[in-house]
């Protein structure tokens, strides 16, 4: 019976443990310095907002682990001795392994800003970050202003959290428009307006120069790079992206780049050592995907994949078509396939926006062949399986328009916009497409 040790109890590590247990009787140990039990990281914001308690974010009851013979250890690994197949913990304790899975996730980026390590300066990634925010921004009396640095998904979540407690928020975004490196201009500009409508002080084309301390060593203000303005605040949120959490591996002999380098079997250069999730860096390109993907569902897929390989069924990681989802305050966002913020040479984009300025879609297709390439949708829920099928079948953009009603996944009695979307497409392209009636038979067909 092999001893399989997993460092990290996030979605990647826990999924690997569960699937290894389904496939084998190996001894399994999960190590985490963060929490005793697995929790849903994407739900952290809802604890602060009062929608959930911590125990509600745990997908499994506490007895699940013992029942399934998965040992849990709370501790911080300082060093991995790959030749001895041994881990060294911060307290000096050591643990042997036969196979090691590194699922150590990410850490918030810091860029050497003066004052970045002051009290009151924090990221929003770990459970400890949530506890710090609860302390630093209990209410608007404790925190009379927060400044968030970095215009990504974590930044907008942090802004929403703080606004639920009526704490004034200034949001520093270095780009000319929010998330415009990812989103086409029309979508990015819609989000600018939406953010401001929630009484968030959005500052575009604005960089952080440094953070000033009070006499007690706490953040008291930020300094704006462009103007030198001092902006008083009690909390500074550093949300300028994340990077793989791999510093403890520098002397391990495991090959590192931006993350832990792995092949398609998720193996590192060291025998019996694997890496999955946010910390893994693919050495072989997978379509147009990034080498490092800090995405929840890809972590889960890697966990399932590595379990097969460790249990004697070598399996390549195949993430399929790109998709993702997020929420920008009141607006839900989904993306399937590829829609670039700056269209590629071969790419044509069709953009539709509702007059209410809180719903829009962008459809990307090949300008010569009309091959459907991807879709972004804001404020309209779309069915993942349908777009995955169309991408696999190399459907045309005209086919997508004709059967767009099949993709709608909004709840019953919601307004429908497919007629308006198709009409706008026809007007722009000189076509005469009539949208087909929604068909449950088509939707659930495997053909």
Image: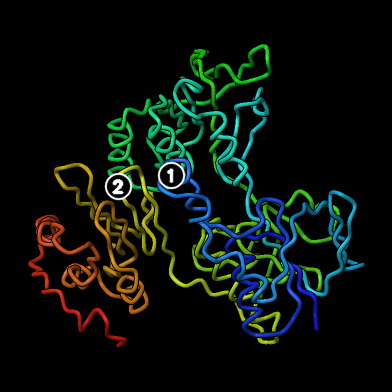
Residue visible at 30% across and 88% down in the picture: 447
Which quadrant of the figure has residue 389?
Answer: bottom left
What x and y, as percent, mark residue 279?
Answer: 65, 57
Quadrant that contains the N terminus: bottom right
The image position of residue 199, as x and y in percent, is 32, 27
Q: How far across and down, in percent of the image, does residue 274 sit?
A: 72, 69
Question: Dot 2 lies on which element?
Answer: strand
Image quarter of residue 133: top right
Residue depicted at 36% across the width and 44% down the height:
328
Residue of label 1: 181
For residue 154, side relative to residue 429 (left or right): right
Measured along the vertical axis of the image, is residue 54 above or below residue 217?
Answer: below
Q: Eyeballing the image, is 315 above or below 191?
A: below
Look at the picture and state if 303 lies above or below 224.
Answer: below
Q: Where does residue 11 sit, x and y in percent of width and height?
A: 57, 63
Question: Which residue lies at the image location 69% right of the left edge and 72% below the top edge?
Answer: 70
């Amino acid at each position: 019976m092999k001893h399989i040790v997993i460092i990290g109890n996030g979605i990647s590590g826990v999924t690997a443990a569960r699937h290894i247990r389904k496939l084998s009787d190996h001894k399994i140990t999960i190590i985490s310095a963060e929490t005793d039990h697995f929790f849903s990281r994407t739900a952290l914001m809802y604890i602060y907002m009062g929608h959930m308690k911590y125990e509600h974010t745990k997908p499994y009851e506490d007895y699940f682990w013992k029942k399934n013979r998965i040992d849990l250890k709370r501790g911080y690994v300082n060093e991995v001795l790959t030749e001895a197949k041994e881990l060294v913990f911060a307290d000096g304790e050591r643990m042997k392994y036969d196979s090691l899975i590194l699922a150590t996730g990410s850490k918030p980026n810091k860029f050497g800003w003066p004052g970045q390590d002051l009290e009151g300066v924090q990221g929003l990634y770990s459970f400890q970050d949530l506890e710090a925010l609860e302390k630093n921004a209990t209410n608007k009396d404790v925190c009379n202003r927060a400044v968030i640095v970095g215009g990504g998904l974590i930044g907008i979540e942090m802004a929403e959290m703080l606004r639920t407690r009526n704490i004034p928020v200034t949001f520093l975004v270095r780009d000319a428009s929010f998330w415009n490196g990812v989103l086409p201009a029309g979508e990015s500009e819609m989000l600018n307006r939406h953010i401001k409508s929630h009484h968030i002080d959005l500052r575009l084309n604005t960089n952080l120069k440094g953070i000033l301390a009070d006499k007690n060593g706490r953040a008291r203000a930020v300094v704006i790079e462009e103007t030198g303005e001092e902006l008083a605040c009690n909390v500074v949120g550093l949300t300028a992206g994340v990077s793989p959490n791999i510093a403890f591996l520098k002397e391990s002999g495991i090959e590192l780049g931006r993350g832990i380098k792995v092949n398609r079997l998720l193996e590192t250069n060291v025998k019996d050592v694997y890496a999955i999730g946010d910390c893994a860096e693919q050495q072989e390109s997978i379509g147009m995907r990034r080498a490092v993907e800090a995405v929840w569902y890809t972590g889960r897929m890697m966990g399932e994949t590595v379990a097969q390989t460790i249990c004697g069924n070598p399996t390549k990681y195949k993430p399929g078509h790109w998709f993702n989802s997020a929420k920008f305050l009141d607006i839900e966002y989904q993306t399937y396939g590829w829609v670039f913020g700056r269209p590629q040479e071969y790419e044509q984009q069709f953009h539709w926006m509702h007059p209410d300025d809180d719903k829009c879609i962008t459809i990307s297709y090949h300008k010569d062949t009309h091959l459907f390439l991807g879709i972004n949708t804001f404020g309209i829920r779309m069915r993942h399986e349908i777009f995955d099928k169309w991408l696999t079948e190399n459907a045309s953009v005209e086919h997508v328009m004709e059967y767009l009603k099949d993709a709608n996944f909004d709840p019953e009695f919601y307004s429908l916009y497919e007629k308006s979307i198709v009409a706008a497409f026809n007007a722009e392209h000189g076509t005469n497409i009539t949208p087909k009636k929604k068909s449950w038979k088509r939707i659930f067909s495997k053909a």
